Image (cartoon, rainbow, N blue to C red):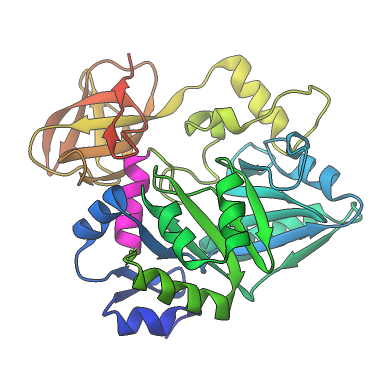
Amino acid sequence: MGLTTPIYSLHVEAGAKLVDFSGWDMPVHYGSQIEEHHFVRSDAGVFDVSHMTVTDIEGPDCEGYLRRLLANDVARLTEPGKALYTAMLNEEGGILDDLIVYRIPDGYRLVVNCATREKDLNWMRAQAESFDCNIVEKPELAILAVQGPRAMDKVGQVVDKETAKLIDTLKPFEAGHAGDWFLGKTGYTGERGLEIILPGDDAVSLWGKLIDVGVKPIGLGARDTLRLEAGLNLYGSDMDESVTPLESNIGWTVAFEPADRWFIGRNALEKQREKGVERELTGLVMTERGVLRGHYPVWSDNQEIGEVTSGAFSPTLQHAIALARIRVPAGNLEVEIRGKRVPVEMVKPPFVRNGKQVYKPAR
């Protein structure tokens, strides 16, 4: 048996199919991944993402430390509650992890991927040696993500008036405290929603209350198709230490200004930006029958120029979609599926936003 979250017994009671996910026993679905996907797009679902790592950065030098550690600039978070998405890079500009960082009253809160937890924390501690700051992991906290067009309404039905009032005041990528709870208008689905960081016992109680008002439990399977439709990268598939943000469709998360802020990986990114990026992460659409899968080769003008990094059948669009890293420039594209090359269209992600098709041709 692997690691378990505070919600584990409720997953078992709900009949979840449990799988090993980076050492954690997590629900992949509760019966039908497709139905769960559609429910998030039409109503509201709750995900247990307590396997993610919550870490607070405290101390006099915490801002200076994070301005060196992260490619985005936490100085942009001018007041508590503000949040931004960023990458943590190595000296070569390779992506060690992607994460969300929140400004909190006494410092900053980071939420990083569970698969990279040990590597991340070791790197963060090593880089903190010359700074007066503390890195405090919060294993006692759980995370529930409530996502979908009715997410705010459903959460508002089960929380107290003060918490409901806080939710109403938050804007996208803002967060705030309600007692021991930390609520952010963030998510990984392309829908409206909240990510709630709270004590484990409270998470068990909140989960039950949400189920009672019609929120459906959603597994990791639907979470993956939802995030792919939203054009969001998955660490370990669409990006890793071998690629930079400029090659991963997240160049917008790199703050090159002010020019005097030196962050780890900056020199490598500046050289790459000057030279020009030789490969890029793009979206692919295939309307013929079939499914695009990770590592399928991508061809252009009879040359193999890259591969699919994430692919799936889109339940919302009813055809195959994918992210792929390819050499640029590229002509008309084909994906090789079991020895046969099938035409695909190159598009700009996201594919779906708020349940609607939004992708456009990349050229």
Residue closer to the observer: 340 or 109: 109
Residue 214 to residue 61: above or below: below
Principal SS element in the magenta part? helix
The quarter of the picture where the C terminus appears is top left
The quarter of the picture where the N terminus appears is bottom left
Q: Is residue 275 found inside the magenta-colored segment of the image? A: no
Residue lying at 69% horizontally and 62% vertically, measured from the top left: 55
Left or right relative to 232: residue 170 = right
Residue 198 to residue 187: above or below: below
Q: Is residue 223 found inside the magenta-colored segment of the image? A: yes
Left or right relative to 313: residue 90 = right
Residue 146 visible here:
yes
Residue 360 to residue 237: above or below: above
Residue closer to the observer: 62 or 32: 32
User: Which residue in the rendered view is the most extreme toward the front?
Assistant: 161
Horizontal and vertical percent for residue 288?
9, 33
- Tell me the magenta residue range: 220-230
Horizontal and vertical percent for residue 144?
49, 64
Residue lying at 74% horizontally and 23% vertically, measured from the top left: 257
Count numbered badges in the picture.
0
Q: Quadrant of residue 19?
A: bottom left
Left or right relative to 20: residue 344 = left
Q: Quadrant of residue 153?
A: bottom left
